Amino acid sequence: MYTLRQDRTLDLTTTHSNQKPGILTLSLDWSHRVVNSTAPNIIVSESDGSIALLSVREGGGLERTEEWHGHDFEAWIAAFNYWSPNVVYTGAYVR
């Protein structure tokens, strides 16, 4: 994650790895686009079909708090329901 500074430059705040060699994160979405939150979450989809929930910790770190196998193939998209951020939608190509 990066923070945009006043002088329009970026500062690296934190990094995150799924700790799975060869597995890519394909999409991400923030939970607080409509319902403001001081502790937003990030939902990610991965190339092994997994979906993971990341929590933003105080100080800017990320913690992988939940993971589940959502699809048999690549999970191309994951998104929050903006008006009910406890609801997540995912999508994958069906072969």
Image: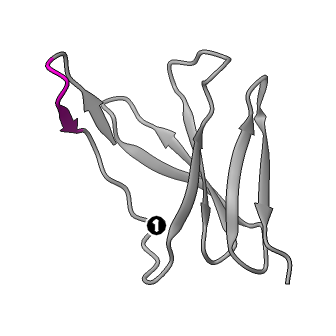
Identify the image quadrant of residue 47: bottom right
Is 3 located above or below residue 28 in the figure?
A: above
Residue to which mark 1 is pinned: 18
CA neighbours of label 1 inside 10 A, class few (<14), some (14 to 19), many (20+): few
The image shows residue 30, relative to residue 74, as above or below, that is above
Q: Residue at x 63, y 78 (%)?
A: 48
**Residue in the image at 31% along x and 52% along y:** 15
Which range is magenta? 7-12
Relative to 50, say whether 5 is above or below. above
Residue 43 horizontal/vertical position (percent): 61, 48
Q: Amino acid at mark 1?
A: Asn
User: Which corner quadrant holds the N terminus?
Assistant: top left
Q: Percent x, y for residue 63?
A: 45, 48
Of residue 86 and residue 79, the one placed in the foreground of this image is 79
Looking at the rendering, which quadrant does residue 21 occupy? bottom left
Q: Tell me the colour scheme of the image.
A: one colour
Picture mark count: 1
Q: Is residue 89 left or right of residue 17?
A: right
Viewer-nearest residue: 63 or 70: 70
Comparing 43 with 38, the one in front is 43
Which quarter of the rendering shows the C terminus? bottom right
Q: Is residue 70 magenta?
A: no
Q: Position of residue 37 (x, y in %)?
A: 57, 18
Name the secondary structure under disc 1: loop
Q: Position of residue 38 (x, y in %)?
A: 50, 18
The answer to which image quadrant residue 66 occupies is bottom right
